[in-house]
Image (tube, coloured by chain):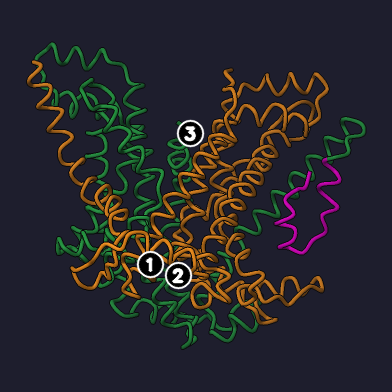
Chain colours: A green, B orange
Amino acid sequence: MATTTHDERMKGQGAGGPSGDTKRQGSRSLGDVSVNTAAHFVLIVWSVIVVVPFVWALLASVKTTDEIFTEPWSLPGEAQWSNFESAWNWEDGFGQYLLNTIIVVSGGVVLTMLLGSMVAYVLARYTFPGNRVVFYLFAAGMMFPVFLAIVPLFFVVDRLGMLSTYHGLILVYVAYSLPFTVFFMHAFFRTLPTSVAEAALIDGASHSGVFFRVMMPMAKPGLLSIGIFNVLGQWNQFVLPQFLSPDRPMLAQAIASLLSNQRYRADWGTVFGFLTLAMIPVIVVYLIFYRQIQSGLTSGTLK
Amino acid sequence: MQHGKYRFIAGFLAVPLGLYSVFVIWPFLQTFFYSFTNWTGLSPEFEYVGFQNFELLWDDTVFRHALRNNIVLLIGLPVLTVFIALLFAFLLNVGGSGAGVRSIRGHGSYKLAFFLPQVLSVPVIALVWLAIFRSTPDGLANSALGAFGLGPYGWLADPAMALYCLLWVLIWGSVGFYLVLFNAAISSVPRDLFEAAFIDGAGRASTFFRVTMPLLWDTIQTSWVYLAILALDGYALVLIMTIGPGNPDSSTQVMALQIAQAGFENGKAGYASAMGVVMFLLTLVVAATLLRLTRRERIEY
């Protein structure tokens, strides 16, 4: 059992310890103790490998470029708070990139949730000719990489005059988020009891009235999971805005272009300052809501 | 009543289906259409050229590099990520001390740490690792390994290593997500099953391979698919992290980068579409292979 030689290679440690222990199981109790120790050892090593790069990046944001690269392991001599200032004022300004991202993601997520639930509900609860076709049409969208269609997509958006516009990017985000949202909500609506909706229909409620007033409130847990999934997915979206919104960059794009801009000018302090500004809010939200985020992101995949 | 029902269905489907058709289905179909043309993308005119683009692709050595690299990622990323994530999920659930089967202490904190890369965007991750993989002796990775007398390595500047650096970053970023996914699946398996195996004298390793893995087979199958799609992209990592991008010596070329360069920089939209078609075929082959390889009886419990 090769206990992930990867992480050990990264840390440059011998593979003898953990893998040796897991194999041998002499007496049960002794074996148990060593398995437990080995398990902790492996898991701690991986935690360090995951967390250290981020901590290092946070520290780098208050270092000078020289310190970042010639003394990578040392603490900053004198905190360079000016890194944040130059990062905040870079090009359009951090605030502008943040605003762009917030506008597009909030529009995108609200519309994705609404339209995705509508499709999912109709497909899950009504029989009509073509139901399966529509379902598989959306399901197929989860299978193929965006890159397959990126060139024609660019020209579609261009011809509609929607390049580098908020509404253009919102509509594209929605279209590409629909497959997974439909798939997930479809499964969710199927698990909800039918009796309440039927009673409401008999009482004279309209089909759409039942959807908005009865089914959507019942679907709240599902909406929360897929909502988290979409917020993170659209917030971190890079490929779509990179090609479709070159003149109105989102945060993820700004990081990439700041880097290609500073790479040879070598002002890495600003780069890491910007990175930290972008990273901190996400990490804070993650630390507060990590249970919901973890289950939201994974529950859809489990269905 | 029936009439009202169909009106309602049509009303609910119209807008989403319209958006989906315009921005997803239509561009996908166009990819196939344009792959048989010499369209530049710069002007509206084009001519049909039959299979010429595909013949050119066959002789395009850079594209072959890209295809080869994508295949390396397609195999390496799912296999290693699933293996590491399963192992960690197993250690978390069964690695606890004491008699019988216990989950490990600090279970939640490990998950909290491992999952972190999942919430950050690819450019953030790419930038951090770009800085770590500096080829100078005082780079972070080199100075860490230097303490053990290893290196210095060229990392992204070394044609033999660069692709594996990218593979590492992809794995590093994915393990946490799949760990949490597998962990959720393992915790939905009744504990008695593990206890029973344990009492029957099965060791932890055989419990892992004989009990845990078969029970998780469905989830693992889904994971292959998602990881394969991830391996077919790789654009952002290559763009941000590699020299060129796509170099040294085309060692980090991927199809996504080739499509973007041909379609948007070199005025070869038709040619880029042909690459898109190859990517489509590769996706189908991968999906069919995965379904074949992973087809097993579903285990109910």
Q: Which residue shows up at 13% across the image and 11% down it?
A: A202
- Residue A226: image quadrant is top left
Mark-to-mark CA distance, 2 and 3: 32 Å
The answer to which of B9 and B281 lies nearer the viewer is: B281
The answer to which of A174 and B252 lies nearer the viewer is: B252
Residues behind callouts 2 and 3 on a single chain? yes
Q: Which residues are magenta?
A: A1-22
Is A10 situated left or right of A23 in this image? left
Residue B206: x and y, percent? 77, 30
Res A303 visible: yes
Mark-to-mark CA distance, 1 and 2: 25 Å
Please, what secondary structure does the residue beneath circle 1 have? helix
The answer to which of B287 and B228 lies nearer the viewer is: B287
Q: Is residue A21 magenta?
A: yes
Q: Which residue shows up at 44% across the image and 42% down it?
A: A297
Residue holding disc 1: B260
- Residue A8: image quadrant is bottom right
Tag 3 or tag 2, which sits nearer the N-term?
A: 2
Q: Mostly what secondary structure, the magenta segment?
A: helix
Task: Tell which tag, 1 or 3, sits nearer the viewer.
Answer: 1
Q: Quadrant of the C terminus of chain A?
A: top left
Mark-to-mark CA distance, 1 and 3: 33 Å
Q: Which residue shows up at 67% across the image and 43% down it?
A: B88
B95 vs B143: above or below: above
Q: Are marks 1 and 2 in contact (CB under 8 Å)?
A: no
A213 vs A48: above or below: above
- On residue A302, the disc is 3
A38 vs B298: above or below: below
Binning the other alpha carbons within 10 Å of mark 3 as few (below 14), some (14 to 19) or many (20 upward) gives: some
- On residue A275, the disc is 2
Residue B223: x and y, percent? 53, 41
